[in-house]
Image (tube, helix red, strand yellow):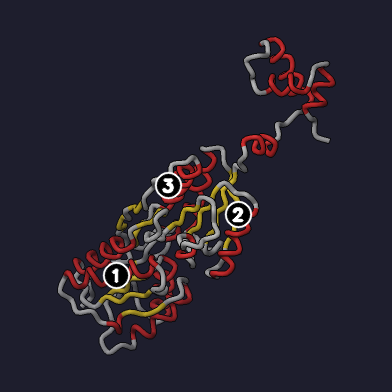
Amino acid sequence: MPVSIKDIAREAGVSPSTVSRALNDHPRISSDTKTFIQNLAKAMGYVPSTVARNLVAKRSATIGVAINHLSDPYYTRMLMGIEDGAASYGYQIILSSFYRDPQRELAIVHDFHKRRMDGIIVAASEVTAAYSAPDSQFFMPIVLINRPAHPVSVSVNGFLGSKKVIDHLIELGHRRIAYITWGTEHADGLNRLGGYQAALQEHNFALDSNLIFDGDGGITGGIKAVPRLLNLSRPPTAIFCFNDMTAIGVINGLHKMGYTVPRDFSVAGFDDLELASYYYPPLTTVRQPTYRVGKSAVNMLLKIINGQNMVSPEILEPTLVVRESTASAAG
C-alpha cells in the first residue's frame, strides 16, 4: 500500500495538516519540524500524489495530442518538440491517432474533452472548421498544427517551400517539372500545389495539368506515378513530390526502370525526414522545422490555458536543403 500523509502523521505524532504543510514548505511550520517530517516521509517511501495536487489546483496537467497518422515519420520530431515543451511547463501528453478519419478525429477530441485535459493539440486536422464553428462543442483550449487558416494554429509555409524547390530546379535548367501531390482538399496540399504553380508562372512557364499526378503520401504512390510520368509524350526532367516518402518511391520506381537519379531525372521531396540524408542518393528536400512547430504549439496552448486569449496564427519558414538527388537537366 502506498504511504499516505495520515501514515506519516501517525508515525510522527502530529496532525495530517501539519504533515501536509511541512511537505509543502509552509512558512507556519518551523524549520526543525519541516526537516524531521520531510526526512521521515522519505524514509517511509512517501510519493506525493500528482492527482491530488491537480485536483486542488483544478487542472489535470495533461495535454491531449491527436495526430493524423502514428506511423508517419514526419511526426517524430514534432512530437519530441511537443513533449519537451509540455515537460518544461510540468505537463504530460496523451497521444492518439485518427488515420485521416474525420469521425475518428472528432471522437478522440471528444474523449480528451471528457477526460478533462487542460488543452488539446491536433496535427493535420481533417475537420478544421469544426473547431471554429459557432456551434462548436469544444469548450477548451485547442491549437491546430499545419492548418494556417485556423485562428489558433502553428504551421509551416508550404507555399514558400514549394516555390523554393521549383526555383532551384529551374536554376538547374529544368523546364518540364512534374508534381506528385497527396490530395488538395486541405491547406498543406493546396499550399504546396500553389507554390509549385506560382513559381512556374513567375518564370513564364505554361502550367501543364498533365504534369500533376495524385499520390498517396507514401512510397507506393511514388512508385506507381513513375510509369505514368514516363508515358507522357513529353516526360518531365524533374519530379517534385509532396513529401519525402513519395520522393523515395519515385527514385525506387525510376531505378527499377533502369534510370539513374539525378543523371536522368532530378527528384526533390518535402519534410527533410532523417531518412532523407541517408538515402541514396541523398535527397534534396524542404526542411520543415517540425521540432519548433511542436514547441510553439505547446507555448500557444499554455498561453490560452493561462488566460491569454489574444493569440494569432504562427507561420514558420521552411528551408531548402540541396543534396545529391537534383542536378542540371539532362540533355
- Most foreground residue, 272 or 254: 272
Horizontal and vertical percent position of residue 74:
47, 59
User: In the figure, is residue 234 to the left or right of 45?
Assistant: left
For the N terminus, the image quarter is top right
The residue that disc 1 covers is 194
Describe the element under mark 1 as helix, strand or loop: helix
**Image point 52% across, 69% down: which residue?**
100
**Residue hosting label 3:** 296
292 up-or-down from 209: above or below? above
Left-right relation of 110 to 17: left
CA separation in Å, label 1 and label 2 = 35 Å
Is residue 298 left or right of 163 when viewed as pictured? right
Q: Amino acid at mark 2?
A: His
Camera-nearest residue between 163 and 245: 163
For the residues marked 3 and 1, what is the alpha-carbon distance in whole angstroms? Answer: 25 Å
Residue type, numbered disc 1: Gly
Residue carrying label 2: 113
Query: 10 Å neighbourhood of mark 3: few (<14), some, or many (≥20)?
Result: many
- State the residue at coordinates (45%, 65%): 129
In which quadrant of the rendered image does the C terminus lie? Answer: bottom left
